[in-house]
Structures are given as structure tokens and as C-alpha cells.
Amino acid sequence: MTVLAIKDLNVTFSTEGGQLHALKNVSFDVPERRIVGVVGESGCGKSTLINAILGLLADNGSIDAGSITFEGEDLTRLGPARMQELRGQRISTVFQDPMGALNPVLSVGRQMRNIQYRSGRSRSEKDARSEAMLRQVRIPDAQAALARYPHEFSGGMRQRVAIAMALMMKPALLIADEPTTALDATLEVATIELLRELQQDIACSVLFISHHLGVIAELCDDVVVMYAGEVVERGTTRQVFHTPRHPYARRLLECDPARQSGRTRHLPTIPGEIPDLRQRPPGCVFATRCDQRVDACDKVPPDVAVETGHVARCVLAEAR
Amino acid sequence: MLRYSAKRLGLAVVIVSVAMLILFCMIYLIPGDPAAVALGPRATDAMREGLRIKMGLDKPVWVQFWNFFSAAWQGDLGRDVLSDRPVATVVMEQLPYTLALILGGISWSVALGIPLGCWAAVERGTMADRIVGVLSVAVIAVPSFVVAIYALLIFAVALRWLPAIGAGEPGDIGDQLVHLILPSLAVGLGWVGYIARMVRASMLEVLESQHIRTARAFGLPERMITYRYALTIAILPTVTLLGVGIGQMLSSAVFAEIVFARPGVGKLVYDAILTRNYPLVTGAVLVTTILFVLLNLLADLIVGALDPRVRSSL
């Protein structure tokens, strides 16, 4: 069963410099109970993707084509009321910055109670549920923690509180937007462990956004590699990490500092930069930075199915 | 919260003491002999000398300051030159009227300014937002005495809806409130504009913040997000601004009391200056200073009560 199916999704923003094509023909699935990682450098459209799924695109952004099917409903066609109903109940989100993601003037208990406003539970039932949730993310002295304010927690604890809030209504899909980027390495490992444990407990699917390849490899079942608003390669973590077929995915993996075997002062980089999304090249979006460029790259690249579930948007993937 | 209040109260005592020092220096530096002023032109040298000794003016300046300082902290602000009653009593009789006027002005500015600013922020870019913006600047630009005179002419003289002068029958709260409407509007109208602009700006800032995005991602209703998640944060700078603004309202109150012939500390100071009644002027100014410091303290305590971050940082 597929919880979330994104098909040919196109998102544009109208800006002063013209139409900005932020997502182009994005397709991938999030199967039930699986953790799907989305990886890509800054500006590749990860945040736009999240906002499109949540129905929270900025006023100047619009979904021009494609569908986002969640539990059988096409989210691109739902009204704002139904979207609001799904958010926080069936689709939940943990954001990157645990410092800014919680309201600074409301107590944690009050915020957790507000999230359950649709549940029909009594106030004491809501508080009991919040307390149980905090205990589950290992917040010490959970009952007292309800009365405390976000600034009274450490960064790692705050992120765990945010995770508790996100999972409180037992959503079918958890979107984790770089949840560990702001944490130090030790906390990162602990948070990943916790996420995995809770995911199995609640039996939800996770869409895990990160630019940390190590974390993706460790946690995710499937990987989606994004570049300049396009999915250039997707497959199981094994397929993408062991046999990357798109030149960008290959270069990205080479750039992972964890892959450096010897001591070096020079970390590899991909020369060039992301093209201006207001003037997309007609052909392959990576062609200008690609070291294996051929003439065919000037035409729109096909989505090549290399293996079952392993797809790369590159003419060279076909040739092999 | 208790420690926070105690700290702020201690700071208030220091501020009042410094204000007393400044006030003392100002009186001391005013040219002329207070004894001569008090006794008038026909007094003899001996009479003046006698009063000087009685007033302690023959002592060194630091003794004079200490006498003034310690007496003032005990509530002794000297005696009114005209009636020979204690200045503290005279000022305290007038204080409730001024206090009511200031609180009335704050009520107008808060009751109109916060909803207008909030509305303009939620409807940003629309016609409603622009109208609120233009009106805000307009009411800020009009001086309070102009508002007082026109309010009097329109609502009291032309339309006869509201009384023109006085503070109402003593003991009749309803009548006093009716008499308060126009003067407090004159004091508070400019602040409606300030607060509307301030609330709009901080609302827009707060609505952009990450935690509001999180609240939306949790599917919370827009009304809850606007009023409970955003406005509670957005009004914090406004409360601080109001605390400082009370100083300006106190000076507007002087005009309002004169235009509407209301009793009050402002009117008292005005009359005292005209009659060169210096002890009354100093006493009234000192009481006004303390009032300002106390209302400022109140504003800080309200911010502390609303913002847990402030509470624990102090």
C-alpha cells in the first residue's frame, strides 16, 4: 500500500523576475511503513515539496500540474478546511529548527493540548495523552514538563518535544524536515534512533528530508535524490548508494566527507551552481555541471527504469 | 515572578531617587530667593531671613538636599504657599482625576489600536489595511490639544451629546464616566494610531516566524493561530511602548484638563506656575514622576506576566 504518491508534480512561483519553476515533474511514492529519504543540496526544492504536500505554499506559489495522493485523496484538489483537518492529524511535521518551531509564550502542555483540539477528549484526557507522549520521547519528569516553556528545555529535548507533538495524533505520514541538522552529532544519533523506534511503534511512514548522506543511508529504506527541483534518481537506499546511475547522484555521493579514505585538505565539490530556475535549460537540468555530457542532453531526459523501483532521469542510464 | 517584581521595584526606587535629585537641582538653580517669592515684595529683610532659616535655606546644599530627600520619601513635600496646606494632600486630592484620565486614554488606545493593528496585519495589502495605515498616521499627526478642542466643539457644543466641562458629580460614577469620555479621547486618540501601527508591524513579523508555520502544519484553526499564537507575542512590544507613552499622555493630560476645565494634577501645575507657587509645582511634578515610574513598572510586570522568557531572564 502506498501512503503518499506524488505524480508529475509541478510547482511555480510568480516572482518579479518571472515565473520560477521550483518543482518540475516530481514523482515518487512513500509506501506504507517505510522511511523515504529526500536528499539534495540547498535550493533543490525540498522545502517547496513539503509545503506543497502540506498545502502551505506561499501566496505567490501554485501547483500547476500533477497530483499528490494521500490515503486515496488528491491533496491538490482538497479545500483548505479538509487540508487543515489532515494536517497534524494524518500528516505531521517535525521542522529543522527546534529553537524556533515551538511557540515561546505558551507552555508545552498548552501547545500539546491545542494540537488535540479536534480529538473530542476532555482536558484531563488530553493532558494525560500529552504526558504519555513526552514520556515516550524520554522527557524526564513528563508531568512537570507540561507546565514548562520551550526556552526551559535544551535543544535536543526541544526537538524530542517537537517529535512528541508531531506523533501525538498517530499520523499516517510524518514529514521530518532536516530534524537533526541543528543538533550536535551525539544528539543526532539519539534522535535518529528515537525516530526509528517511534515510527515502528506507531507504524507510520516517514518522509525524511536531509542533506546528510550518512543519516539517510542509516535510517531510510528508499532514497529520492533531488536537483534543481527535479527528482534525478530514486530507488531503494541500497540501489542508489551502491549503484547510482545519475551523474549528479554519483558526484553527490563522492562528495560525502565520510567517504574520504585518506587524509586530505581538499574535499571534493561539484563545480558550477544550480541554474536559475526562472530560465530552466530545455534539456537536462544538470547538463551544465555534468562531466559526462553528450549531445542528447540538450533534449528532455527520460525517466529510465534501471531496475524495479530504481529510476534515473538521464539518457546515459538508458545506454547501459 | 516574585524575584522579577522585587528587582523591578528596587529599580523604580532608584529611578525616583534620581528624579528627586534632578528636581532638587532644578529648584536650587532657579534664580531668585524662594523666601522672597513666598513672602511677596512688601516683606522686610528680617522677615525674609526668618523664613530662610525656617525653610532651611541657610544650611549647606547637601543638607538641604538630604532634608528634601528624606522628607519627600516620608510623604512631606512642603506646604502650599497660598493655602498653607501640605502639598502632598493638595496633589493627592487631584491625582485620582488625572489617573482616571490617563487610564481612560490607555483604554481608548488599547481597545481601538490593538484590534485595528491586528486586523490590518491579517488583511495586509488590502484596502482595509491601507485605510487603517492612513488613519493611523493622521491621528498620530494631530496634536492632542487640537483633538481636545475639536472634540469639545463637535460632541459637546454642536451635537450636545456629551458634557463640555468639569469632571462630573462627585460620587456619581456614571456621570463621572460620561465626563471622562471626551478628555480621555483627546489623550488617547494619537496612541490609537501608534498602537495600531506597532501591533500591525509586530504581527506581520510574528506571523512569518517558524513557530507559526509549525502551528499551521499542525492544522490549528487560523483564529487560534492569530489570537493565541501570534497576538500574545505581538502585543509585547506594544505594552512596553505604552509604558513609555504614559509620559506623553501625562503631558497631553495637562491640555485636556485645561480645555475641559477638569480638576487634575496637570491643571494644578498650570495654576501653580501662573501663581509662582513653587512648592506646589515641585510636589506635583514629583508625584507625576512617581506615577510615571509606577505605571512603567506596571507595564514591565505585565510584559513579565505575558512572556515567560522575560520572567526567567531576570
Image: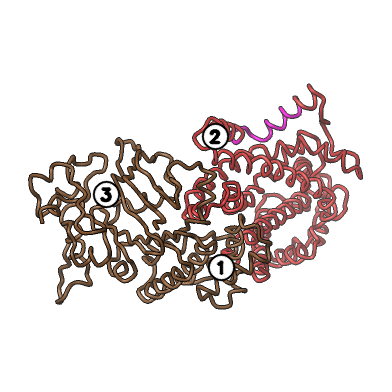
Chain colours: A brown, B red
Q: Which residues are magenta?
A: B140-152
Instruction: Inspect the magenta stretch and tell me whether residue B143 lies in it.
Output: yes
Camera-side mark, 2 or 1: 2
The quadrant in which residue A144 appears is bottom right
First-in-chain label (2 vs 1) = 2
- Name the magenta segment's main secondary structure: helix
Q: Mark 2 to mark 1: distance in Å?
A: 36 Å
In-front residue for pair A83/A112? A83
Three-letter residue code for mark 2 = Asp
Three-letter residue code for mark 1 = Ser
Q: Residue furthest left?
A: A295
Circles 3 and 1: CB distance less than 8 Å?
A: no
In-front residue for pair A13/A300? A300
Determine which of the numbered discs, if any, sits on residue B313 in the image.
1
Label 2 secondary element = helix
Q: Judge whether B314 appears above or below A14 on screen.
A: below
Residue matched to label 3: A230
Label 3 secondary element = strand
Could you classify mark 3 by the number of other residues whose Cα lies within 10 Å: few (under 14), some (14-19), or many (20 or more)? many
Q: Mark 3 to mark 2: distance in Å?
A: 39 Å
- Percent across and percent down for residue B264 are 79, 44
Three-letter residue code for mark 3 = Glu
Residue matched to label 2: B129
